Amino acid sequence: LAAGIELASSVEKNKMRDIVVLERRERADEFDQGKAYLYLIDKRGRRWTDRHALTDVIGARGVSSANYTITRVYPDGRGLETVTPPLSSPQGIWIPRAQFLAVLAEKAVKISQENKCSLQLEYRALITGIEMNNENGVFVHVKMTNNQNNQIEERCYAPKSLLIGCDGLDSMVRSAMDVPPCVILPSPSAGLCYKIMSVPSNFKVKDLSTQKLVQTEPNRAYTLRSAATQRQRNIRLGFLPVAPSVRIRTANVIKPKNHHVWKLQSLDEARAFFKSSFPQLPKPFADAELEPFVQAAKNPDRIASFPASRYSPIVSKVCTDKKIPCLLLGDAASAFPPDLGQGVNSALEDVLVLGNLINSQSLSQQPLTDAFQKERAPANKALAKIVRCAFPFQYDQAPLRSKIFFVGFLTRLLLSRLLPFLIAPPAALAVLKGEPYVDVWRRAERTTWLFRSIFFSACIVSSFFFLTTKQRLIPPSFFSFVA
Protein backbone atom coordinates (compact mmCIF):
# COMPACT_ATOMS: atom_id res chain seq x y z
CA LEU A 1 0.00 0.00 0.00
CA ALA A 2 2.76 2.45 0.91
CA ALA A 3 4.60 1.67 -2.33
CA GLY A 4 1.38 2.18 -4.29
CA ILE A 5 0.85 5.55 -2.62
CA GLU A 6 4.42 6.57 -3.43
CA LEU A 7 4.04 5.65 -7.09
CA ALA A 8 0.67 7.35 -7.40
CA SER A 9 1.98 10.54 -5.79
CA SER A 10 4.84 10.63 -8.30
CA VAL A 11 2.69 10.02 -11.35
CA GLU A 12 3.86 13.21 -13.05
CA LYS A 13 7.43 11.91 -12.89
CA ASN A 14 6.97 8.19 -13.53
CA LYS A 15 4.20 8.58 -16.16
CA MET A 16 2.43 5.47 -14.83
CA ARG A 17 -1.34 5.72 -14.89
CA ASP A 18 -2.19 2.14 -13.96
CA ILE A 19 -0.97 0.93 -10.57
CA VAL A 20 -2.20 -2.35 -9.09
CA VAL A 21 -1.71 -3.33 -5.44
CA LEU A 22 -2.38 -7.00 -4.70
CA GLU A 23 -3.32 -7.75 -1.09
CA ARG A 24 -4.02 -11.16 0.39
CA ARG A 25 -6.17 -9.72 3.19
CA GLU A 26 -9.93 -9.40 2.81
CA ARG A 27 -9.77 -5.66 3.54
CA ALA A 28 -7.24 -3.14 4.79
CA ASP A 29 -8.54 -2.89 8.36
CA GLU A 30 -9.07 -6.62 8.79
CA PHE A 31 -8.29 -7.74 12.36
CA ASP A 32 -6.14 -10.84 12.16
CA GLN A 33 -5.27 -11.87 15.70
CA GLY A 34 -2.31 -13.89 14.49
CA LYS A 35 -0.85 -10.65 13.10
CA ALA A 36 -2.39 -8.14 15.50
CA TYR A 37 0.92 -6.38 16.02
CA LEU A 38 1.31 -2.88 17.36
CA TYR A 39 3.58 -0.79 15.19
CA LEU A 40 5.83 1.88 16.64
CA ILE A 41 6.25 4.40 13.84
CA ASP A 42 9.51 6.03 14.88
CA LYS A 43 11.47 8.95 13.48
CA ARG A 44 12.60 6.87 10.49
CA GLY A 45 9.07 5.86 9.52
CA ARG A 46 7.75 9.35 10.15
CA ARG A 47 9.93 10.73 7.37
CA TRP A 48 7.64 8.93 4.94
CA THR A 49 4.38 9.72 6.78
CA ASP A 50 5.44 13.39 6.95
CA ARG A 51 5.96 13.42 3.18
CA HIS A 52 2.37 12.32 2.62
CA ALA A 53 0.78 14.33 5.47
CA LEU A 54 -0.15 11.16 7.34
CA THR A 55 1.64 11.71 10.65
CA ASP A 56 -1.23 13.64 12.23
CA VAL A 57 -3.76 11.11 10.95
CA ILE A 58 -1.76 8.25 12.44
CA GLY A 59 -1.29 10.20 15.66
CA ALA A 60 -5.06 10.67 15.99
CA ARG A 61 -5.58 6.90 15.77
CA GLY A 62 -2.57 5.94 17.84
CA VAL A 63 -0.71 6.93 20.99
CA SER A 64 2.42 9.07 21.22
CA SER A 65 5.46 7.39 22.77
CA ALA A 66 6.58 10.62 24.42
CA ASN A 67 7.02 10.17 28.19
CA TYR A 68 6.55 6.44 27.67
CA THR A 69 6.22 4.39 30.87
CA ILE A 70 5.28 0.83 31.76
CA THR A 71 3.14 -0.13 34.75
CA ARG A 72 4.16 -3.46 36.23
CA VAL A 73 1.34 -5.42 37.83
CA TYR A 74 2.82 -7.90 40.28
CA PRO A 75 1.20 -11.17 41.41
CA ASP A 76 1.88 -10.41 45.08
CA GLY A 77 1.91 -7.66 47.67
CA ARG A 78 4.15 -5.42 45.59
CA GLY A 79 1.03 -4.30 43.74
CA LEU A 80 1.59 -1.84 40.89
CA GLU A 81 4.79 -0.04 39.93
CA THR A 82 5.35 2.42 37.09
CA VAL A 83 8.81 2.51 35.51
CA THR A 84 10.55 4.06 32.51
CA PRO A 85 11.89 1.40 30.12
CA PRO A 86 15.55 1.50 29.06
CA LEU A 87 14.59 1.57 25.39
CA SER A 88 11.99 3.89 23.90
CA SER A 89 11.48 6.25 20.97
CA PRO A 90 10.34 9.69 22.18
CA GLN A 91 9.14 10.71 18.72
CA GLY A 92 7.22 7.53 17.91
CA ILE A 93 3.55 6.69 17.55
CA TRP A 94 2.03 3.40 18.67
CA ILE A 95 -0.72 2.21 16.34
CA PRO A 96 -2.33 -1.21 15.73
CA ARG A 97 -1.44 -2.81 12.42
CA ALA A 98 -5.06 -2.86 11.21
CA GLN A 99 -5.49 0.85 11.97
CA PHE A 100 -2.26 1.73 10.19
CA LEU A 101 -3.20 -0.22 7.06
CA ALA A 102 -6.64 1.43 7.09
CA VAL A 103 -4.94 4.85 7.04
CA LEU A 104 -2.84 3.79 4.06
CA ALA A 105 -5.88 2.44 2.18
CA GLU A 106 -7.79 5.69 2.69
CA LYS A 107 -4.81 7.70 1.50
CA ALA A 108 -4.43 5.46 -1.55
CA VAL A 109 -8.01 6.12 -2.63
CA LYS A 110 -7.67 9.84 -2.06
CA ILE A 111 -4.37 10.24 -3.87
CA SER A 112 -5.63 8.18 -6.80
CA GLN A 113 -8.51 10.60 -7.24
CA GLU A 114 -6.37 13.71 -6.83
CA ASN A 115 -3.66 12.61 -9.28
CA LYS A 116 -6.11 11.17 -11.80
CA CYS A 117 -4.39 7.83 -12.03
CA SER A 118 -5.73 4.33 -11.65
CA LEU A 119 -4.62 2.89 -8.30
CA GLN A 120 -6.40 -0.45 -7.87
CA LEU A 121 -6.45 -2.08 -4.45
CA GLU A 122 -7.19 -5.75 -5.09
CA TYR A 123 -7.99 -7.66 -1.89
CA ARG A 124 -8.27 -11.43 -1.38
CA ALA A 125 -5.60 -11.85 -4.06
CA LEU A 126 -3.48 -14.99 -3.84
CA ILE A 127 -0.39 -15.01 -6.07
CA THR A 128 -0.02 -18.49 -7.51
CA GLY A 129 3.00 -17.92 -9.69
CA ILE A 130 5.28 -15.37 -11.33
CA GLU A 131 6.59 -16.03 -14.80
CA MET A 132 9.52 -14.17 -16.31
CA ASN A 133 9.78 -14.73 -20.02
CA ASN A 134 12.70 -13.10 -21.80
CA GLU A 135 10.74 -12.45 -24.96
CA ASN A 136 7.29 -11.61 -23.57
CA GLY A 137 8.07 -10.03 -20.20
CA VAL A 138 6.74 -10.61 -16.68
CA PHE A 139 3.43 -12.26 -15.81
CA VAL A 140 1.90 -12.42 -12.33
CA HIS A 141 -0.74 -15.15 -11.96
CA VAL A 142 -3.35 -14.48 -9.29
CA LYS A 143 -6.41 -16.18 -7.85
CA MET A 144 -9.00 -13.59 -6.87
CA THR A 145 -11.88 -14.41 -4.52
CA ASN A 146 -15.10 -12.50 -5.14
CA ASN A 147 -16.35 -10.85 -1.96
CA GLN A 148 -20.01 -11.34 -2.87
CA ASN A 149 -20.21 -14.98 -3.90
CA ASN A 150 -16.75 -16.26 -2.87
CA GLN A 151 -16.15 -17.53 -6.38
CA ILE A 152 -12.52 -17.78 -7.46
CA GLU A 153 -11.38 -15.98 -10.58
CA GLU A 154 -7.96 -16.46 -12.14
CA ARG A 155 -6.22 -13.37 -13.48
CA CYS A 156 -2.88 -12.55 -15.02
CA TYR A 157 -1.16 -9.20 -14.67
CA ALA A 158 1.68 -8.16 -16.96
CA PRO A 159 3.57 -5.18 -15.47
CA LYS A 160 5.14 -3.05 -18.16
CA SER A 161 7.07 -0.48 -16.15
CA LEU A 162 7.85 -1.85 -12.68
CA LEU A 163 7.30 -4.86 -10.40
CA ILE A 164 7.68 -4.39 -6.66
CA GLY A 165 7.83 -7.40 -4.36
CA CYS A 166 6.58 -6.66 -0.85
CA ASP A 167 5.42 -10.24 -0.35
CA GLY A 168 7.23 -11.16 2.82
CA LEU A 169 9.76 -13.63 4.08
CA ASP A 170 9.18 -16.29 1.41
CA SER A 171 8.89 -13.81 -1.42
CA MET A 172 7.71 -15.25 -4.73
CA VAL A 173 8.97 -12.14 -6.49
CA ARG A 174 12.44 -12.72 -5.10
CA SER A 175 12.35 -16.35 -6.25
CA ALA A 176 11.23 -15.32 -9.73
CA MET A 177 14.01 -12.75 -9.97
CA ASP A 178 16.52 -15.60 -9.66
CA VAL A 179 18.81 -13.79 -7.25
CA PRO A 180 21.18 -15.39 -4.69
CA PRO A 181 19.47 -16.76 -1.57
CA CYS A 182 19.16 -14.67 1.56
CA VAL A 183 22.10 -14.56 3.94
CA ILE A 184 20.87 -15.95 7.27
CA LEU A 185 22.45 -14.76 10.52
CA PRO A 186 21.87 -16.45 13.89
CA SER A 187 20.13 -14.35 16.53
CA PRO A 188 19.53 -14.97 20.25
CA SER A 189 15.81 -14.24 19.82
CA ALA A 190 15.33 -16.24 16.61
CA GLY A 191 13.11 -19.27 17.07
CA LEU A 192 11.22 -17.91 20.08
CA CYS A 193 7.57 -18.92 19.82
CA TYR A 194 4.79 -16.40 20.28
CA LYS A 195 1.03 -16.20 20.61
CA ILE A 196 -1.07 -13.03 20.58
CA MET A 197 -3.89 -12.80 23.12
CA SER A 198 -6.59 -10.14 23.21
CA VAL A 199 -8.56 -8.48 26.01
CA PRO A 200 -10.81 -5.41 26.26
CA SER A 201 -8.70 -2.26 26.01
CA ASN A 202 -9.76 -1.11 29.50
CA PHE A 203 -9.48 -4.48 31.26
CA LYS A 204 -9.24 -4.56 35.05
CA VAL A 205 -6.44 -5.80 37.28
CA LYS A 206 -6.25 -6.35 41.01
CA ASP A 207 -3.76 -4.41 43.08
CA LEU A 208 -2.77 -7.18 45.49
CA SER A 209 -1.15 -4.68 47.85
CA THR A 210 -4.56 -3.13 48.55
CA GLN A 211 -6.88 -5.86 47.18
CA LYS A 212 -8.63 -3.20 45.08
CA LEU A 213 -9.61 -3.45 41.43
CA VAL A 214 -7.90 -1.00 39.09
CA GLN A 215 -9.19 -0.24 35.60
CA THR A 216 -6.35 0.04 33.13
CA GLU A 217 -6.05 2.98 30.77
CA PRO A 218 -5.86 2.08 27.06
CA ASN A 219 -3.19 4.68 26.28
CA ARG A 220 -0.77 3.32 28.89
CA ALA A 221 1.46 0.26 28.73
CA TYR A 222 1.24 -2.58 31.25
CA THR A 223 3.15 -5.74 31.97
CA LEU A 224 1.72 -8.56 34.07
CA ARG A 225 4.28 -10.64 35.96
CA SER A 226 3.66 -14.32 36.59
CA ALA A 227 3.30 -15.87 40.05
CA ALA A 228 5.29 -18.89 38.87
CA THR A 229 8.98 -18.78 39.65
CA GLN A 230 10.17 -21.84 37.75
CA ARG A 231 11.79 -20.85 34.47
CA GLN A 232 9.73 -23.36 32.45
CA ARG A 233 6.45 -22.04 33.89
CA ASN A 234 7.12 -18.33 34.29
CA ILE A 235 5.56 -16.08 31.63
CA ARG A 236 4.90 -12.38 31.21
CA LEU A 237 2.12 -10.51 29.44
CA GLY A 238 2.93 -7.13 27.93
CA PHE A 239 0.16 -4.75 26.83
CA LEU A 240 1.26 -1.89 24.59
CA PRO A 241 -0.77 1.36 24.47
CA VAL A 242 -3.72 1.89 22.13
CA ALA A 243 -5.99 4.85 21.48
CA PRO A 244 -9.13 5.02 23.67
CA SER A 245 -11.25 4.45 20.56
CA VAL A 246 -9.71 0.98 20.09
CA ARG A 247 -11.81 -1.58 21.94
CA ILE A 248 -9.36 -4.48 21.92
CA ARG A 249 -5.74 -4.55 22.98
CA THR A 250 -3.33 -7.41 22.61
CA ALA A 251 -0.57 -9.07 24.61
CA ASN A 252 2.19 -11.34 23.42
CA VAL A 253 3.24 -14.59 25.04
CA ILE A 254 6.86 -15.07 23.92
CA LYS A 255 8.72 -18.14 25.12
CA PRO A 256 11.07 -20.87 23.83
CA LYS A 257 9.49 -23.90 22.23
CA ASN A 258 10.20 -26.14 25.24
CA HIS A 259 8.27 -23.89 27.66
CA HIS A 260 5.32 -25.35 29.54
CA VAL A 261 2.88 -22.88 27.99
CA TRP A 262 3.22 -24.73 24.68
CA LYS A 263 2.46 -28.09 26.30
CA LEU A 264 -1.02 -27.46 27.71
CA GLN A 265 -3.01 -30.53 26.70
CA SER A 266 -6.57 -29.38 27.44
CA LEU A 267 -8.68 -26.30 28.09
CA ASP A 268 -8.94 -27.25 31.76
CA GLU A 269 -5.17 -27.37 32.03
CA ALA A 270 -4.85 -24.04 30.19
CA ARG A 271 -7.43 -22.39 32.46
CA ALA A 272 -5.65 -23.65 35.57
CA PHE A 273 -2.24 -22.56 34.28
CA PHE A 274 -3.25 -18.97 33.48
CA LYS A 275 -5.35 -18.63 36.63
CA SER A 276 -2.47 -19.68 38.88
CA SER A 277 0.03 -17.59 36.87
CA PHE A 278 -1.94 -14.33 37.07
CA PRO A 279 -3.85 -13.93 40.35
CA GLN A 280 -3.84 -10.18 39.62
CA LEU A 281 -6.32 -10.80 36.77
CA PRO A 282 -9.81 -10.96 38.34
CA LYS A 283 -11.44 -12.09 35.09
CA PRO A 284 -10.08 -15.25 33.44
CA PHE A 285 -9.18 -15.39 29.76
CA ALA A 286 -11.91 -16.54 27.41
CA ASP A 287 -11.67 -20.11 26.12
CA ALA A 288 -11.20 -18.73 22.61
CA GLU A 289 -7.91 -17.17 23.80
CA LEU A 290 -6.73 -20.40 25.43
CA GLU A 291 -7.69 -22.86 22.71
CA PRO A 292 -4.69 -21.94 20.47
CA PHE A 293 -2.33 -23.02 23.26
CA VAL A 294 -4.00 -26.43 23.35
CA GLN A 295 -3.72 -26.67 19.58
CA ALA A 296 -0.05 -25.68 19.82
CA ALA A 297 0.58 -28.68 22.07
CA LYS A 298 -1.06 -30.95 19.50
CA ASN A 299 0.71 -29.34 16.53
CA PRO A 300 4.03 -27.94 17.80
CA ASP A 301 5.33 -27.38 14.28
CA ARG A 302 2.59 -24.82 13.63
CA ILE A 303 3.49 -22.47 16.46
CA ALA A 304 4.45 -19.04 15.13
CA SER A 305 8.05 -18.11 15.84
CA PHE A 306 10.51 -15.28 15.24
CA PRO A 307 12.64 -15.61 12.09
CA ALA A 308 16.40 -15.46 12.07
CA SER A 309 17.92 -12.22 10.85
CA ARG A 310 18.40 -12.33 7.10
CA TYR A 311 18.92 -10.09 4.12
CA SER A 312 18.88 -10.48 0.36
CA PRO A 313 22.21 -9.45 -1.24
CA ILE A 314 20.29 -8.36 -4.35
CA VAL A 315 17.20 -6.16 -3.91
CA SER A 316 16.78 -4.88 -7.45
CA LYS A 317 17.27 -6.26 -10.92
CA VAL A 318 16.29 -5.56 -14.51
CA CYS A 319 14.39 -8.65 -15.66
CA THR A 320 13.70 -10.13 -19.09
CA ASP A 321 14.54 -8.61 -22.46
CA LYS A 322 11.74 -6.12 -21.85
CA LYS A 323 14.03 -4.51 -19.24
CA ILE A 324 11.41 -4.37 -16.48
CA PRO A 325 12.83 -3.18 -13.15
CA CYS A 326 11.99 -5.54 -10.27
CA LEU A 327 12.52 -4.36 -6.69
CA LEU A 328 12.28 -6.01 -3.26
CA LEU A 329 10.94 -4.03 -0.29
CA GLY A 330 10.18 -4.81 3.33
CA ASP A 331 10.43 -8.41 4.53
CA ALA A 332 11.10 -9.57 0.99
CA ALA A 333 14.43 -7.73 1.16
CA SER A 334 15.31 -8.26 4.82
CA ALA A 335 13.64 -9.89 7.82
CA PHE A 336 14.53 -10.24 11.49
CA PRO A 337 12.98 -10.69 14.96
CA PRO A 338 10.87 -7.75 16.17
CA ASP A 339 13.37 -6.73 18.86
CA LEU A 340 13.62 -3.11 17.70
CA GLY A 341 10.30 -2.75 15.87
CA GLN A 342 12.14 -1.93 12.66
CA GLY A 343 10.12 -4.09 10.27
CA VAL A 344 7.57 -1.40 9.43
CA ASN A 345 10.05 1.49 9.71
CA SER A 346 12.70 -0.02 7.45
CA ALA A 347 9.95 -0.85 4.93
CA LEU A 348 8.74 2.76 4.98
CA GLU A 349 12.33 3.87 4.46
CA ASP A 350 12.52 1.51 1.46
CA VAL A 351 9.48 3.27 0.01
CA LEU A 352 10.89 6.71 0.82
CA VAL A 353 14.11 5.89 -1.04
CA LEU A 354 12.10 4.49 -3.95
CA GLY A 355 10.13 7.71 -4.19
CA ASN A 356 13.29 9.81 -4.18
CA LEU A 357 14.78 7.71 -6.96
CA ILE A 358 11.62 7.73 -9.05
CA ASN A 359 11.68 11.49 -9.01
CA SER A 360 15.21 11.48 -10.40
CA GLN A 361 15.47 8.31 -12.51
CA SER A 362 13.75 6.75 -15.51
CA LEU A 363 11.71 3.63 -14.70
CA SER A 364 12.59 1.99 -17.97
CA GLN A 365 16.37 2.06 -17.60
CA GLN A 366 19.11 0.49 -15.53
CA PRO A 367 19.88 3.49 -13.27
CA LEU A 368 16.79 2.91 -11.07
CA THR A 369 17.77 -0.63 -10.15
CA ASP A 370 21.43 0.28 -9.72
CA ALA A 371 20.63 3.25 -7.51
CA PHE A 372 18.13 1.30 -5.38
CA GLN A 373 20.62 -1.55 -4.95
CA LYS A 374 23.32 0.90 -3.89
CA GLU A 375 21.03 2.63 -1.39
CA ARG A 376 19.17 -0.27 0.22
CA ALA A 377 21.32 -3.40 0.05
CA PRO A 378 23.99 -2.05 2.48
CA ALA A 379 21.27 -0.71 4.78
CA ASN A 380 19.46 -4.05 4.88
CA LYS A 381 22.69 -5.90 5.58
CA ALA A 382 23.58 -3.51 8.40
CA LEU A 383 20.11 -3.74 9.96
CA ALA A 384 20.12 -7.54 9.92
CA LYS A 385 23.43 -7.45 11.81
CA ILE A 386 22.26 -4.76 14.23
CA VAL A 387 19.13 -6.66 15.28
CA ARG A 388 21.24 -9.70 16.23
CA CYS A 389 22.99 -7.80 19.03
CA ALA A 390 21.07 -4.58 19.74
CA PHE A 391 18.36 -5.78 22.17
CA PRO A 392 17.75 -9.53 21.74
CA PHE A 393 17.46 -10.57 25.41
CA GLN A 394 14.36 -8.58 26.35
CA TYR A 395 12.27 -11.78 26.41
CA ASP A 396 13.99 -13.41 29.44
CA GLN A 397 14.85 -16.45 27.33
CA ALA A 398 18.30 -16.83 28.88
CA PRO A 399 18.53 -15.26 32.38
CA LEU A 400 22.32 -15.31 32.74
CA ARG A 401 23.00 -14.04 29.23
CA SER A 402 20.28 -11.40 29.75
CA LYS A 403 22.07 -10.06 32.84
CA ILE A 404 25.41 -10.00 31.04
CA PHE A 405 23.84 -8.23 28.08
CA PHE A 406 22.19 -5.51 30.20
CA VAL A 407 25.44 -4.89 32.07
CA GLY A 408 27.16 -4.39 28.72
CA PHE A 409 24.29 -2.22 27.46
CA LEU A 410 24.44 0.10 30.49
CA THR A 411 28.24 0.18 30.42
CA ARG A 412 28.28 1.23 26.78
CA LEU A 413 25.57 3.83 27.45
CA LEU A 414 27.48 5.34 30.38
CA LEU A 415 30.83 5.41 28.56
CA SER A 416 29.21 6.95 25.46
CA ARG A 417 28.06 9.85 27.62
CA LEU A 418 31.44 10.27 29.26
CA LEU A 419 33.45 9.80 26.05
CA PRO A 420 31.05 10.60 23.18
CA PHE A 421 33.96 11.26 20.79
CA LEU A 422 35.29 7.75 21.33
CA ILE A 423 32.45 5.41 22.39
CA ALA A 424 29.25 4.99 20.39
CA PRO A 425 25.96 4.69 22.29
CA PRO A 426 24.12 1.34 22.20
CA ALA A 427 23.03 0.59 18.64
CA ALA A 428 19.39 0.19 19.68
CA LEU A 429 19.18 3.82 20.83
CA ALA A 430 20.81 5.11 17.64
CA VAL A 431 18.39 3.09 15.49
CA LEU A 432 15.33 4.48 17.30
CA LYS A 433 16.68 8.00 16.72
CA GLY A 434 16.45 7.36 13.00
CA GLU A 435 20.18 7.33 12.27
CA PRO A 436 21.29 5.50 9.09
CA TYR A 437 21.68 1.78 9.67
CA VAL A 438 25.06 1.65 7.96
CA ASP A 439 26.45 4.41 10.18
CA VAL A 440 25.01 2.81 13.32
CA TRP A 441 26.61 -0.54 12.54
CA ARG A 442 29.95 1.01 11.61
CA ARG A 443 30.15 2.89 14.92
CA ALA A 444 29.00 -0.18 16.88
CA GLU A 445 31.72 -2.31 15.28
CA ARG A 446 34.34 0.32 15.98
CA THR A 447 33.34 0.50 19.65
CA THR A 448 33.32 -3.29 19.97
CA TRP A 449 36.77 -3.44 18.39
CA LEU A 450 37.97 -0.80 20.86
CA PHE A 451 36.61 -2.74 23.86
CA ARG A 452 38.24 -5.93 22.64
CA SER A 453 41.55 -4.16 22.10
CA ILE A 454 41.46 -2.75 25.62
CA PHE A 455 40.55 -6.17 27.05
CA PHE A 456 43.34 -8.04 25.25
CA SER A 457 45.82 -5.30 26.05
CA ALA A 458 44.88 -5.54 29.72
CA CYS A 459 45.32 -9.32 29.58
CA ILE A 460 48.79 -8.97 28.05
CA VAL A 461 49.88 -6.34 30.57
CA SER A 462 48.50 -8.41 33.46
CA SER A 463 50.28 -11.52 32.24
CA PHE A 464 53.55 -9.62 31.83
CA PHE A 465 53.18 -8.13 35.30
CA PHE A 466 52.48 -11.55 36.80
CA LEU A 467 55.44 -13.19 35.08
CA THR A 468 57.88 -10.46 36.12
CA THR A 469 56.74 -10.40 39.75
CA LYS A 470 55.89 -14.01 40.52
CA GLN A 471 59.34 -14.78 41.96
CA ARG A 472 58.96 -11.91 44.41
CA LEU A 473 55.44 -13.00 45.38
CA ILE A 474 56.01 -16.78 45.57
CA PRO A 475 58.97 -18.38 47.38
CA PRO A 476 61.52 -20.05 45.04
CA SER A 477 61.12 -23.26 47.02
CA PHE A 478 57.56 -23.53 45.68
CA PHE A 479 58.79 -23.74 42.07
CA SER A 480 61.43 -26.29 43.10
CA PHE A 481 58.70 -28.35 44.71
CA VAL A 482 56.52 -28.17 41.59
CA ALA A 483 59.46 -29.19 39.41
Image (spheres, helix red, strand yellow):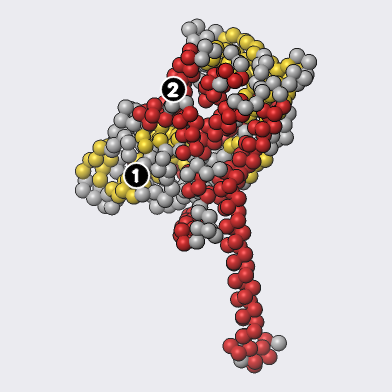
Residue placed most toward the observer, 442 or 131: 442
Residue 134 screen position, x and y as percent: 78, 19
The amino acid type found where label 1 is placed reads Asn
Answer whether residue 40 is visible to the viewer in this image: yes
Residue 67 got which mark?
1
The amino acid type found where label 2 is placed reads Ala
- First along the sequence among labels 2 and 1: 1
Residue lying at 63% horizontally and 36% vertically, measured from the top left: 375
Left or right position of 248 against 425: left
Q: Secondary structure at mark 1?
A: loop
Residue placed most toward the observer, 345 or 459: 345
Mark 2–mark 1 Cα distance, whole angstroms, equals: 27 Å
Residue hosting label 2: 102
Q: Secondary structure at mark 2?
A: helix
In the figure, 454 relative to 330: above or below?
below
In the figure, 470 relative to 437: above or below?
below
Residue placed most toward the observer, 282 or 267: 282
